[in-house]
Image (cartoon, grey):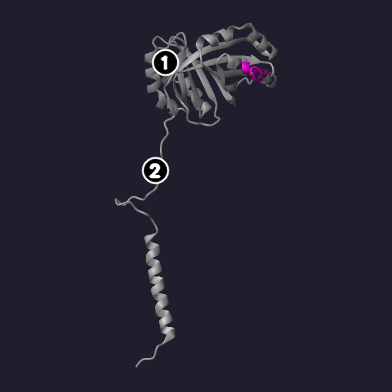
Amino acid sequence: MKRFNPFRALILFTAMTLLFASCNSGDKKTTETPTGDTTTTPDVKVNTIVTTPQLMGMIKHKVKDYAAWKAAYDSHDSARLANGLHSYVIGRGMDDSMMVLIAMKADDLEKAKAFAKDPSLKERMQKGGVVGAPEISFVNVVWQDTVNVGSIPRVITSFTVKDFDTAKKGFEEGRQERMDNGITDRQYGHDADDNHKVSMVTALKDVDKAKAYWGSDAIKKRIEAGGLTTQPQRFIFNIVARY
């Protein structure tokens, strides 16, 4: 009869333990569905395009001192809110930082217009150091992309057209061409009282490339196809405040 060898038994027990452990660890590497796909959470794409019309008030003017003007502007916020105007963004000109662009969301067009004509607003602007007459407009934004593109420069482009629908079609068709030239669409709309007066805001990923495109034959063809009756007027600015 063979004697029981404790050392040999210990080796056999250890080997079997390692074998089962390796099998179990292999089973736990991934969890699969019956079709063989891993149970990872798919990326959900968020739609950032807004086509619900948004009334915006736009003011552009020059100031003597930006810090002094900004303090005066902020102190007048309650009056704007009382008239249905909500501060949105403030921009400063790229070529002239004393040129300021203010964009506000507006609840009611007639109320906003009345506020813009109120003598107290003119007095407040003068005290804040506004130079010259401000350019005030109300735009009905019909398309905008709310995706965050960072703090790159923006440009607001204004022009008049024969027909808004034709211009809008040209805007849609030219999007990829603009992207290829460092220009990303942000919003597009027309004057609240006259849809022949169009404005669009774009972001510039490459300012030099965009400027070269604006002087190219390609943009001339776009202008003709869109039925523009005036040359585009552009104001490049950097966003310095968001609300």
* Residue 10 sits above or below residue 2 on the image: above
- State which quarter of the image contains the C terminus: top right
Task: Return the mark for residue 223.
Answer: 1
Q: Within the image, what quadrant is residue 96 found in?
A: top right
Label 2: which secondary element: loop
- Report if residue 232 is visible in the image: no
Q: Nearer the viewer, residue 176 or 188?
A: 188
Q: Is residue 27 left or right of residue 160?
A: left
Give the percent coordinates (x, y) of residue 71.
Answer: 68, 20
* Residue 114 sits above or below residue 184 on the image: above
* Residue 131 sits above or below residue 30 on the image: above
Q: Is residue 77 magenta?
A: yes
Q: Is residue 223 left or right of residue 153?
A: left
| Residue at horizontal 37 percent and vertical 14 percent from the top | 165
Look at label 1 and name its amino acid.
Answer: Ile
Q: Is residue 30 magenta?
A: no
Look at label 2 and name its amino acid.
Answer: Pro
Instruction: Give the magenta-colored segment's residue range.
Output: 72-78
- Report if residue 176 is visible in the image: yes
| Residue at horizontal 58 percent and vertical 9 percent from the top | 116
Q: Nearer the viewer, residue 198 or 148?
A: 148
Q: Nearer the viewer, residue 73 or 195?
A: 73
Label 1: which secondary element: helix
Lower position in the chain sequence, tag 2 or tag 1: 2
Give the percent coordinates (x, y) of residue 221.
Answer: 39, 17
* Alpha carbons under labels 2 and 1: distance apart: 42 Å
Q: Is residue 49 left or right of residue 85?
A: left
